Image (spheres, coloured by chain):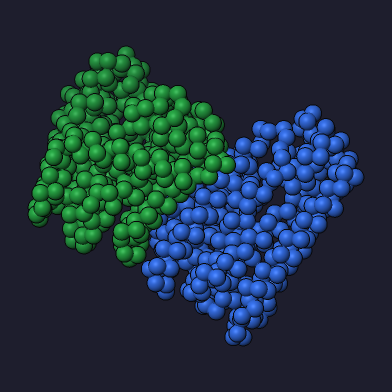
Chain colours: A blue, B green
Amino acid sequence: MALKDYMQVMQPAIETDLQQFINQSIPAEYPELRAMLTYHMGWEGEGAGPEAQGKRIRPLLVLLCAEAAGGNWRSALPAAAAVELLHNFSLIHDDIQDNSPLRRNRPAVWVKWGAAQAINAGDVLFTLAFVSLQRLSVTLPPQNVLLANQILQNTCLRLTQGQYLDMSYESRSTLPLDAYWPMIGGKTSALLSCCCELGALSAGVGEGQRAIFREYGSSLGLAFQVLDDWLGIWGDVALTGKSAESDLVSGKKTLPVITALSKDGPFARRWALGKIASQEVPALAQMLEEEGIYAYTLETAENLTTQAVEALQQATRACSSDGQVNAAQALQELTHSLLRRKH
Amino acid sequence: MALKDYMQVMQPAIETDLQQFINQSIPAEYPELRAMLTYHMGWEGEGAGPEAQGKRIRPLLVLLCAEAAGGNWRSALPAAAAVELLHNFSLIHDDIQDNSPLRRNRPAVWVKWGAAQAINAGDVLFTLAFVSLQRLSVTLPPQNVLLANQILQNTCLRLTQGQYLDMSYESRSTLPLDAYWPMIGGKTSALLSCCCELGALSAGVGEGQRAIFREYGSSLGLAFQVLDDWLGIWGDVALTGKSAESDLVSGKKTLPVITALSKDGPFARRWALGKIASQEVPALAQMLEEEGIYAYTLETAENLTTQAVEALQQATRACSSDGQVNAAQALQELTHSLLRRKH
């Protein structure tokens, strides 16, 4: 079975489980509250559909890791739903915090219902993530459900710490090089690491094996984010398409930017002068390239990709059944598709 | 031991546990994030001190219920901290949602650090509530810790649903009489009910007994809120002191207001014309009195108080040890002090 075969069965199952779970958890007496959630999840309202739902990479990762660890992916659905709910909670609050009017090309929840209701809708998804995880009790012993809770709680702590750093960096004109890793460790890597560990846990494997899955998710998350940062400056859309979409225009503190700022060269001097206009983007991207930042960022992404692939190999070395081997291969395929992407 | 004797030992223990727990959970690398939390909790920053900490009624309720149910209050501290953290999460988000600049007579977190950071600080407290509860594992079997999680999760769902109703009522000029109870059931009563049930659970009592503690907390919460609504119009400060602090000026959908609106009499006709100025307050309070709303609200508060007292008697009927009997008496004292208060 290839990745696409797994996706064909897993993705509809994830969608169905999430929809049923939200409908069961929010009583019909709160139709508008439900509407906010089903709109944000991409199932209802203007522009609903696969594009609006996002790729559901995180729950897919949970289910594939559960299979690769020798479990049954269906038993891991409560954990898969939990990570997707947590991810979507963070998106709703993120959009308010960043004042971003669009999410997946549709008006963000706060634009449609106001910031006050959107904060609360995020809080509901946050709660539902924990409620969903608790459903693991059907197949796991209580001690392991508590462990799953603890993993999700630590992830929330790291997420909120990463978010704090990200926001506090906005107002700072200069940053040390090591400011980057705790931020993306919290904002991107913690949740992917949580996905892989929860997948392994729901298959019932012990701490040693779980640590390797956790490590795989962590490297995958870091590699994913560094590549994202690279694409945000040198990707097709950022550089040649619409330069307004370049991370340089939004002022994001990405790895290339933080690295360049620590070098205190021509780019750093231009950055200190204030907001970058879209017509400056090609010249500034060139400037970064000349300072060695293009190559450094790509190399960092590649090293992290190698780490992720090796951790995955280690995590799945002991795979014995055909099912496990297939799932491990699908994970490898997923890893490559995420870390070799062009946009 | 009277209530004040319990308070003398329990309140410092609550404060110490909360402080240590927050410091352990938020690494020292995030000093500003910690500062937001310790400021909001009333321990640090301008105006810090007992006034800024609030009364910590909720954790006190947990500990007294634990004792009355035959447990040891120290074992219930993780649950006590959890409800206080959850309460404070909701206050931080509430202040942003209501655009309220003051909390306990100090600038709200969002005023000092901006709404974006304040949303995140609330999310941190929300997470910490669950992390704290997990500490019950030290004394409770895993199955009961899971049950405690479930109780807290249900409370979060009810809180967020109540918050949703409260905000959605703001824009409505008229409301049916039965709109009130689900709102305060979620906003006030759910958490007090949770306190009493978690206290009983941490003492290890079974579902039947827990249900009575839950019922006590629920009635206590409803009675507390209805009395609060009454005081918001006919209390000393609201009516004679500074009329600007009257709930009539803020436009809150309290029980007296919702009841009067459903009667469609002189008050409802005035309400429909728009915002009430502070100089109108005495005349409008009089108008409500003539429509029977003063008496109805007070009667409702008294009926609910009776229900709470009876539930408490039922919950503590089986108290056998001196410790249990003392705690039950202290709970009765606390109930009366909350439900006979003048402001």
User: Residue shown at 41%/43% (left/top)?
Assistant: B20
The mark total stands at 0
User: Residue shown at 26%/47% (left/top)?
Assistant: B62
Pick the front one: A101 or B116: B116
* A270 displayed left or right of B165: right
Q: Does B276 appear above or below A305?
A: above
Q: What percent of the width, then of the height, locates residue B304? A: 17, 41
Q: Quadrant of the N terminus of chain B?
A: top left
Pick the front one: B323 or A254: B323
Q: Does residue B120 show up? A: yes
Residue B3 falls in which quadrant of the image? top left
Pick the front one: A309 or A57: A309
**Residue ranking furthest to the top:** B279
Q: What percent of the width, then of the height, locates residue B43? A: 41, 32
Pick the front one: B94 or B139: B139
Q: Does residue B185 show up? A: no
Q: What percent of the width, then of the height, locates residue A299? A: 81, 57
User: Residue shown at 21%/54% (left/top)?
Assistant: B71
Residue A179 falls in which quadrant of the image? top right
Q: What percent of the width, then of the height, locates residue B338? A: 20, 34
Q: Quadrant of the C terminus of chain B?
A: top left
* B224 displayed left or right of A339: left
User: Residue shown at 56%/72% (left/top)?
Assistant: A209
